[in-house]
Image (tube, coloured by chain):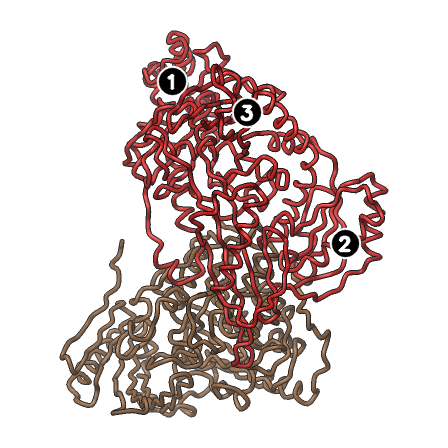
Chain colours: A red, B brown
Amino acid sequence: MYIGIDVGGTCTDAVLLDRGLVRAMAKVPTREDLLSSLLEALDEIMKGVEGELVERVVFSTTVITNLIAEKKYDPVGLILMPGPGLSPSLYRFPTDTHIIQGAIDYRGREIIPLRLTEVDQAAAELAARGYRKVAVVGKFSCRNHRHEKEVAARVLWNYPDWHVELGHQVAGQLNFPRRVVSTYLTCATREKYQFFVRSVQEAISQRGIKGAIFILKADGGTLPLESSLEVPVETIFSGPAASTLGVQALTPPGETAVVVDIGGTTTDLALILSGQPLLASRGARVDDMLTHVRALAVKSVPVGGDSVVERVGKDIIIYSERLGAPYCLGGPLPTPTDALRVLGLTRLGDVDRAREAMQMLGAPLGLSVAEVASRVTTRVIETITREIEAMFSRWEQEPAYRVWEVLQKKKVRPSTVVGVGGGAAGFVSQIAARLGCYPVIPPYAPVANAIGAAVARPTLQVTLRADTEQGIYIIQEEGYQGKITERSFNEEKALELAKEWLCKRAARHGLEDCVEGLEVTRREVFNMVRDWVTVGRLIDVTVQTRRGILYHVGAGGTSE
Amino acid sequence: MKNNKTGLVFFPAFDWAISPTHPEREERLLYTRDQIFEEGVLDLPEIEEYAPRLATIHDIARVHFCVPRVQSQVTEAHLIAAGSATLLADAIVHGELKNGFALVRPPGHHAMRVVHGNRGFCNINNEAILVEYLRRHHGIKRIAIVDSDVHHGDGTQDIFYHDPDVLFISFHQDGRTIYPGTGFPNELGGPGAYARTINIPLPPGLGDETFHYVVDNLILPILEDFKPEFIINSAGQDNHFTDPLGSMRFTARGYAEFTRKLNPHLAVLEGGYAIETALPYVNLAILLALAGHDYSYVREPEWPGTMPENPERVARVQRVVEQLRNVWENRDRVDLDKIFGTGTFYQRRKHIYYDTDYIEEEQLERVRRCPNCPGYITIDSRADHGYGHPNRVFCVSIPFTACGACQTEAYDAYEQARGLAQYQFVYLQDKSTDTFLAFDRDKGQEWVSEGPKVGE
């Protein structure tokens, strides 16, 4: 049996799945102490079920999101080696930043050496200002981490009890400013996250559950809880990923659909293209900073069932804030939910109070209760529909760097609009009608997020970059740099090597099972030609475990 | 709706090359990609990346006479490179962007009006396609192209040699020392477009200081007089001190400063073959300059500092600058008949060598000296591919602003050539109505490209 738990901002949802069937579900309010909400939900679905029967527990959590949002972490200083390029004044990071000499180029060659006296000085200044945590990041450190390691060694030699985080270990992709932010946030949250993880492990084992515990990441993949300690920031924004995977599990395979998750204050939109959730092309924005955190492409629209509706002059305006429950549920001000109630599109709350809410808005304009209600819902529907259209055109506008990529780009439009979340029922059919799609509200829609967490697959990937001219290779995710000893190293051998590394990595995380059916997601070979002679090759290969979900719910548990 | 953003189309064409070891190959923009991505430049709020798009066959036919037809001379990569430039131009004209950089491959500035094959790594001319597109779709008339490639932009010069509304300025390494061997100060444009072509040959080995002397004392003053509505930079980067094909000594910073001063609407990548030592840095510096950012921290690893320049060569450049300023200032007082004669047609013979495809072409170009318009052009072209019979074609081009008389005469010339057995293909390019015809003698067929109708 599988368990999925989604700790959201308002509610903590849980489901117990038994071979693709929902055995139990729970919805409890999320309290300040996340752990207690998590356990309460867990206990509710586990009634009468032996802990030993649970094979895996997957949960998504807001713990890192909250830590970052509320800045509940120790200060982190930065020591950076940006080398030549953008002016350092363009890099504005929200903390003490020390820029020192030293530079690596795009092929990992040192172009400016480090000066250790500058490292000492930077560390001393940070120490004087009370820092005990520092992130060390160099430009192109993912191509050669020597400078970062030397700086860290020097800092720790001076201050052995400091917590030092290195850029190349946090993010292997190109984009130095994002690597800085990711490293900074990792350094900031690691300790507190560790504490949280230990408590979860403790609590779950107390419930007699011996199955594996996983945590959901923003990209919809899972990681063993223990392994997530390495990358705490990747657990941010797993809520929308959970809902999207839930929809994927609750709809037929291969569908192109828009997921509309209408909550109280926001509506989250996501795309499923031919059965796979769309990943954002670049890393997520965290606390208004750009990071390397891989995430599903989710657009949050600031409108929901509880948004405040007001009359301004002759206009009726929907604000992006929530000031309590809808009027029909005893709240202070009219909301879209009241409009839905009046139109008979929801059964929530008291219809008389809902009519009263519409009356307050419409009377000065001489509009009937029904007219106001339909105006309010139309506004909401228009806003959401516009954002869906924009999301598709943004996806079509993604850059392409190869001829075939440009040629294969075609307009894709969804066939279905799938509604989940509290406000979905009232709005989804009209949104679908505007987009020319079928509306779908799947069974278990209110706990789709928990279902998504339960069926999410573990994901692991390995990116290998080999430079045969220099005789070196790098495993991006591991921050490993090795030598190529074989003289006849080629693309096929690079692929074999990458697969070996993926297996090693899987073993380290206890995920040996999922190495089956590996996918090669990137394969690039460039000849390096000097003076008309090929002197070497640059080979880039990315292999990953199968993405997606374990099975579709309600379909008898067949694996996808 | 004036926007302050710089648009970028980055199209490295990682799956397109002339041949595996050719300088113009897949790897060319690889390190540029790494540098731009690693810097996080695309995250800057002032820079907006666009997805590339394809130019249409019609867009190409508006500029070139491709033999036998457009489809046989262009690949999809060519259409994407040209289309990306027009895409950015649309956004600039619509006010979404203040300027843009089409960082694309393959390049185009050696492609001339008639195309029998690839010359100087080029098949179709991205800047020329852009100019005609701007005129047709946006009604922009006066356009300036400044070519900063180390090689003379002979293709662009050829296409606009008789066009009074397009100012073409090229500085480059002296043609006696480098391909294509043209671009001397006496090439000034035809009788109807005198001094609309300006060539500044530079002796090899000169650096940023002389480069900026030319910019400040010749290029910028001429542009100020000409008052173009749109400025295009044909942004070749092989004047760099590490370039394997050129012998100049410009730096990334020199290029960036030039970009800042020129302030082009659109820069379109041309040459530049120092793919590791120059391109990542020069492209980054140009992009920063376009976006109005500080580029002074962009420095190539081999940056030599200031370099002493040969005073004798610098003096030579100063003389050329002075001479050309003179030409420019007196352009309206010159007796054109003295230079070009008094016939109804001005004609010149051209010999064109296609270095990549080993084609020898002989051309007789004639332009009608019309008092009311720039005059129509006919080209009798014979291309020797080194096997079998040479290919002979006849081309007629009617300018955008043609008068009725020229248009009628041009159609007559086309009809007449269709009746002559020596031409395998006869073409008519009517820019005034955006209609292009091609007649295939062997098949006895004519095909027409009328392009999209209004509202499509």
Answer left or right for B209 relative to B32.
right
In space, the residues marked 1 and 2 are separated at their CA atoms by 61 Å
Q: Nearer the viewer, residue B411 or A418?
A: A418
Give coordinates of residue A204: x percent, y percent: 58, 24
For the residue carrying disc 2, how many other residues have a C-alpha within 10 Å: few (<14), some (14-19), or many (20+)? many
For the residue carrying disc 1, how many other residues have a C-alpha within 10 Å: few (<14), some (14-19), or many (20+)? many
Q: Nearer the viewer, mark 1 or mark 2?
A: 2
Q: Nearer the viewer, mark 3 or mark 2?
A: 3
**Dots 3 and 2: beta carbons under 8 Å?**
no
Residue B145 vertical placement versus A126 (above, below): below
Of the two numbered discs 1 and 2 on the same chain, state the one appearing first in sequence: 2
In which image quadrant can residue B341 be found?
Answer: bottom left
Of the two numbered discs 3 and 1 on the same chain, state the one appearing first in sequence: 3
Return the residue at label 3. A209
Residue A314 in sight: no
Q: Nearer the viewer, residue A432 or A64?
A: A64
Q: Amino acid at mark 2?
A: Val
Give coordinates of residue B87: x percent, y percent: 41, 59
Give coordinates of residue B335: x percent, y percent: 44, 88
Return the residue at label 2. A151
In space, the residues marked 3 and 2 are separated at their CA atoms by 43 Å
Q: Amino acid at mark 3?
A: Ile
Say which element carries label 3: loop
Say which element carries label 2: helix
Res. B392 mark: none
Residue B168 in sight: yes
Res. A339 mark: 1
Give coordinates of residue B314: x percent, y percent: 66, 85
**Dots 3 and 1: beta carbons under 8 Å?**
no
Say which element carries label 1: helix
Q: For the point 63% across and 21% down, which residue is it? A: A33
